[in-house]
């Protein structure tokens, strides 16, 4: 992506998607291979294949269908990405984060990202839901590299709460409410 044109590419993509979707959703979810089928639960979906979206990459990961979906989930308007682009697929970090920046321009305020991952704790079972409270970036690159656009946020965001404590508490409430044998999987005491 040409750095001089990046801001215009974000705006062009956001304008295309805004013309395709209804309402003003404030929540988005990026569905990884573990939760890709959640897209089937979205009511009244508008499905836009990535290849039809200007400047979107193609997901090559197994289980990532490559659709942008607008609809209702739990009675709320949402956007969903059914699959995403990964750094390991050969995309730059700017390309990997491109949809997130476009969603910001579309008015998204809450973003949930799912993925399938392994863990070292022998108490974890396949299919356990995990909630990330912090992370260490081990990539040689990061999404803040390059030109900053104030419309998308500050140059160096406050990382003391990279993951919303309010949303983590809501997620834990949901897990405890729906789990037949609730246990604290967040690591908090």
Image: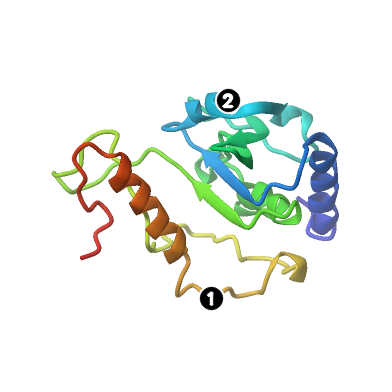
The residue positioned 58% from the left and 29% from the top of the image is 42
Query: Foreground residue, 136 or 134?
Result: 134
Question: Would residue 64 appear left or right of 149 to someone viewing this image?
Answer: left
Horizontal and vertical percent for residue 109? Answer: 63, 58
Query: Foreground residue, 9 or 126?
Result: 126
Asked whether the residues under the numbered discs 1 and 2 touch, taking CB atoms below 8 Å apart as contact, a structural biologist would say: no
The residue positioned 81% from the left and 58% from the top of the image is 7
Q: Residues within 10 Å of mark 1 (few under 14, many from 20)?
A: few
Quarter location, residue 141: bottom right
Q: Residues within 10 Å of mark 2 (few under 14, many from 20)?
A: many
Instruction: For residue 2, say whether it is visible.
Output: yes
Element on which disc 1 rests: loop
Determine which residue is flagged by label 1. 158
Whichever of callouts 1 and 2 sits on the residue coming sooner in the sequence is 2
- Is 180 rendered above or below residue 99? above
Instruction: For residue 163, say whether it is visible.
Output: no
- Is 86 rendered above or below residue 172? above
- Is 109 rendered above or below residue 148? above
Determine which residue is flagged by label 2. 65
Query: Foreground residue, 57 or 154?
Result: 154
Query: Foreground residue, 51 or 102?
Result: 102
The residue positioned 17% from the left and 48% from the top of the image is 121
Horizontal and vertical percent for residue 41? Answer: 53, 27
Question: Would residue 132 appear left or right of 61 to someone viewing this image?
Answer: left
């Amino acid at each position: 992506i040409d750095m001089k044109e990046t801001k215009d590419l974000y705006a062009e993509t956001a304008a295309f998607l805004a013309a395709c979707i209804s309402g003003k959703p404030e929540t988005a979810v990026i569905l990884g291979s573990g939760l890709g089928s959640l897209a089937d639960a979205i009511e009244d979906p508008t499905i836009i294949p990535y290849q039809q979206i200007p400047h979107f990459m193609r997901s090559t990961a197994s289980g990532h269908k490559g659709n942008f979906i607008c609809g209702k989930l739990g009675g709320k308007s949402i956007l969903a990405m059914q699959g995403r682009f990964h750094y390991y697929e050969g995309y730059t970090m700017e390309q990997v984060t491109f949809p997130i920046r476009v969603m910001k321009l579309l008015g998204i305020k809450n973003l949930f990202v799912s993925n399938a991952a392994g863990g070292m704790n022998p108490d974890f079972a396949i299919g356990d839901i995990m909630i990330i409270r912090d992370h260490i970036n081990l990539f040689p690159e990061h999404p803040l590299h390059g030109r900053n656009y104030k419309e998308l946020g500050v140059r160096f965001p406050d990382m003391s709460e990279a993951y919303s404590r309010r949303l983590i508490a809501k997620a834990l409430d949901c897990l405890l409410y729906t789990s037949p044998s609730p246990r604290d999987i967040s690591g908090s005491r």
